[in-house]
């Protein structure tokens, strides 16, 4: 009985050590956008993306690409061009902001894929 408990504890400790020793490949966090102030009709603003931290990712993520904004609802309230939003009329619109990781060709060849991060937020037009 005692040997069995020792073996179980040893296996659990070994498993925990192995799992905590693994560094993540991709950033462990969420994509965010800076807090947006309400827009006036006809006014424009750029969306400032806050990317997840890439520290501790073993250098797999070299940067970010394909940043885009998609209108989910309220396409009559705002218009989008690149990362710039323009208020058309009063109301609230929902948008989805996305960005894709850039990884090296060697990492792609070894089976890793670029990962898309996204966040949904609201834009208010006064």
Image: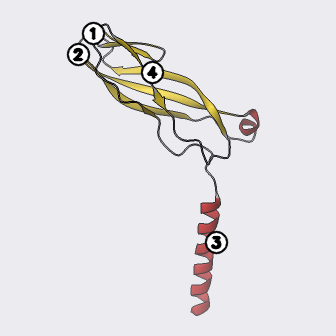
Residue sitting at x 49%, y 28%: 98
- Mark sitting earlier along the chain (2/3): 3
- Residue 104 left/right relative to 37: right
Residues tagged 1 and 2 counted as in contact (Cβ below 8 A): yes
Q: How many marks?
A: 4
- Name the residue beneath numbered marker 1: 41
Q: Is residue 95 above or below residue 55?
A: above
Rounded to the nearest angstrom, the CA distance separating label 3 from label 4 is 45 Å
Disc number placed over residue 126 in the picture, else none: 2
- Mark sitting earlier along the chain (1/2): 1
- Mark sitting earlier along the chain (1/4): 1
Disc number placed over residue 69 in the picture, else none: 4
- Mark sitting earlier along the chain (4/2): 4
Rendering coords of residue 57 (x, y %): 63, 46
Residue sitting at x 72%, y 39%: 107
Rendering coords of residue 78 (x, y %): 33, 13
Viewer-side label of 3, 1: 1
Rounded to the nearest angstrom, the CA distance separating label 1 from label 2 is 6 Å
- Mark sitting earlier along the chain (3/1): 3
Rounded to the nearest angstrom, the CA distance separating label 1 from label 4 is 19 Å
Disc number placed over residue 14 in the picture, else none: 3
Q: Secondary structure at mark 2?
A: loop
Viewer-side label of 1, 4: 1
Q: Quick one: label 2, few (<14), some, or many (20+) residues within 10 Å?
A: some
Q: Secondary structure at mark 1?
A: loop
């Amino acid at each position: 009985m005692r040997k069995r408990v020792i073996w179980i504890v040893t296996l659990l400790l070994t498993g925990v050590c192995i799992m905590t020793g693994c560094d993540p490949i991709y950033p462990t966090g969420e994509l965010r956008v800076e807090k947006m102030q309400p827009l006036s009709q006809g006014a424009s603003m750029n969306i400032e993306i806050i990317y997840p931290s890439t520290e501790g990712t073993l250098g797999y993520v070299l940067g970010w690409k394909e940043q885009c904004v998609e209108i989910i609802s309220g396409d009559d309230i705002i218009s989008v061009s690149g990362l710039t939003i323009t208020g058309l009329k009063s109301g609230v619109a929902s948008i989805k902001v996305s960005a894709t990781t850039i990884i090296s060709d060697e990492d792609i060849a070894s089976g890793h894929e670029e990962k898309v991060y996204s966040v949904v937020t609201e834009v208010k037009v006064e």
